[in-house]
Image (cartoon, rainbow, N blue to C red):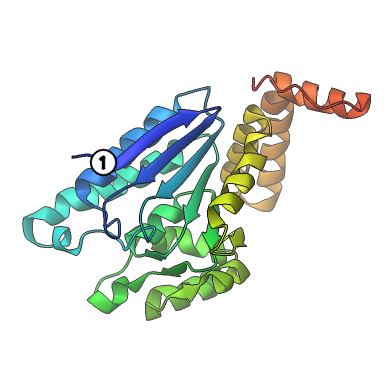
């Protein structure tokens, strides 16, 4: 039985975790999620990806039982492959988080580029309380919120509120629990109104420049801008529309 679904409509691909009651992630689910990410990554009609979750919570983490005995190697392979899939996606991915977002659930959210949260959401990496640590979060969390704040979360295992996550830079925007669905839909809609090619190029520039020394990063981004971005139709359309004082008609190429 599948616990991950995919729908594509109007340039938006929505991937939904759906394993009641709290979307505990299994090895099979992680492999399915990785396959879906690779599928939409190659779909040029998809401009934005939304990662959602059904039920009362985003995800309580990876199935603890699959960490034990002979199940561990397959689970870790699936986890590693999932984050390789996240790294391969050229479109922006938005995690839409409500309820608990813990352990592997938070790691999945960290695989996304942007996080939208309900005010009722909580975020944490409690693995240390089980005598282990969180491999993808050890890499991704310091990049998102800085080494000091990430160290606090990873070494204490304590959860933070949505407002605290916003202050740390873990979350991009928080909406009230009442009306969260509408707020998240409108926020994602703003991304959909932008050029798909510009979003891809901007994401690529951010990812490729971030690990480079400053001078190399400036040179690399300059080259990307001149050689790749300015080769797209939408770059010329957007600039021309601004000068002509008219709305752009994006071609997404």
Residue at 63 percent across and 33 percent down: it is 201
Residue 214, percent across and down? 68, 52
The kind of secondary structure element at disc 1 is helix
Give the residue number, with chain letter if any, for mark 1. 31
Which corner quadrant holds the N terminus? top left
Farthest-out residue, left:
70
* Residue 211 visible, this orientation: no
Residue 189, percent across and down? 63, 40
Foreground residue among 251 and 200: 251
Total numbered circles: 1
Residue at 11 percent across and 62 percent down: it is 68
Residue 63, percent across and down? 21, 59
User: Compared with residue 91, is residue 23 higher up or lower down, i.e. above or below?
Assistant: below
Is residue 28 found left or right of 175 in the rendered image?
left
Residue at 33 percent across and 44 percent down: it is 82
Q: Quadrant of residue 243?
A: top right
Is residue 57 found left or right of 198 in the rendered image?
left
Farthest-out residue, front:
178
* Residue 229 visible, this orientation: yes
User: Compared with residue 121, is residue 7 higher up or lower down, i.e. above or below?
Assistant: above
């Amino acid at each position: 039985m599948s616990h991950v679904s995919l729908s594509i409509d109007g340039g938006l691909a929505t991937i939904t975790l759906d394993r009641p009651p709290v979307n505990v992630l299994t090895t099979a689910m992680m492999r399915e999620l990785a396959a879906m990410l690779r599928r939409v990554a190659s779909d040029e009609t998809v401009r934005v990806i939304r990662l959602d979750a059904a039920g009362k919570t985003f995800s309580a983490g990876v199935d603890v039982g699959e960490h034990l005995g002979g199940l561990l190697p397959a689970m870790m392979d699936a986890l590693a492959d999932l984050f390789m899939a996240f790294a391969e996606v050229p479109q922006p991915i938005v995690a839409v988080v409500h309820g608990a977002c813990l352990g592997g659930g938070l790691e999945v959210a960290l695989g996304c580029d942007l996080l939208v949260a309900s005010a009722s959401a909580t975020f944490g990496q409690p693995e240390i309380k089980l005598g282990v640590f969180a491999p993808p979060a050890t890499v991704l969390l310091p990049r998102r919120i800085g080494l000091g704040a990430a160290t606090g979360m990873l070494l204490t295992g304590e959860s933070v509120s949505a407002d605290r996550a916003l202050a740390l830079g873990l979350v991009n925007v928080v909406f009230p629990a009442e009306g969260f669905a509408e707020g998240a839909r409108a926020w994602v809609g703003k991304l959909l109104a932008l050029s798909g090619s510009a979003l891809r190029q901007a994401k690529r520039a951010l990812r490729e420049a971030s690990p480079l020394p400053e001078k190399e990063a400036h040179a690399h981004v300059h080259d990307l801008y001149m050689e790749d971005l300015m080769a797209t139709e939408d770059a010329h359309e957007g600039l021309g529309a601004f000068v002509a004082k008219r709305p752009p008609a994006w071609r997404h190429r």
